[in-house]
Amino acid sequence: MKHLDDNDVRDRAFLIWKQAGEPAGHMDEFWYEAERQLEQERLQEIGAAGEALSD
């Protein structure tokens, strides 16, 4: 199972922060949201790969 890469999380957190209007503080919230999104995408990819293999 692939572990989330800190660079990927950092890049995603930065994008989320930019989209939120670059607010001061709460960086942990952006980091955790980035982790959540990336993990969800990873799980969707795993599910899609599993479906492709079962076809």
Image (spheres, helix red, strand yellow):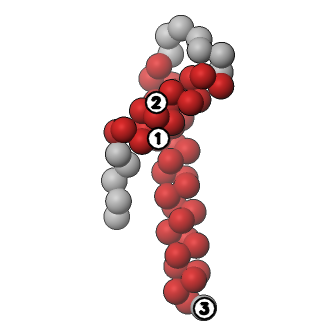
Q: Measure the C-alpha gap from mark 3 to mark 1.
A: 30 Å
Q: Position of residue 39 (x, y in %)?
A: 48, 51
Residue 17, which numbered label? none
Q: Residue at x 57, y 63 (%)?
A: 44
Q: Circle 1 — which element? A: helix
Residue 29 in view here: yes
The residue beneath circle 1 is: 35
Q: Nearer the viewer, residue 21 or 54?
A: 21
The quarter of the picture where residue 48 lies is: bottom right
Q: Residue at x 50, y 47 (%)?
A: 38
Residue 32 in view here: no
Residue 31, which numbered label? 2
Residue 55, which numbered label? 3
**How many discs mark residues in the rendered view?**
3
> What amino acid is at disc 3?
Asp
Q: Measure the C-alpha gap from mark 2 to mark 3.
A: 36 Å
Q: Circle 2 — which element? A: helix
Question: Are there few (<14), some (14-19), or many (20+) residues within 10 Å of tag 1?
Answer: many
Q: Nearer the viewer, residue 10 or 31?
A: 10
Callouts 2 and 1 close, C-beta under 8 Å: yes
> What amino acid is at disc 1?
Glu
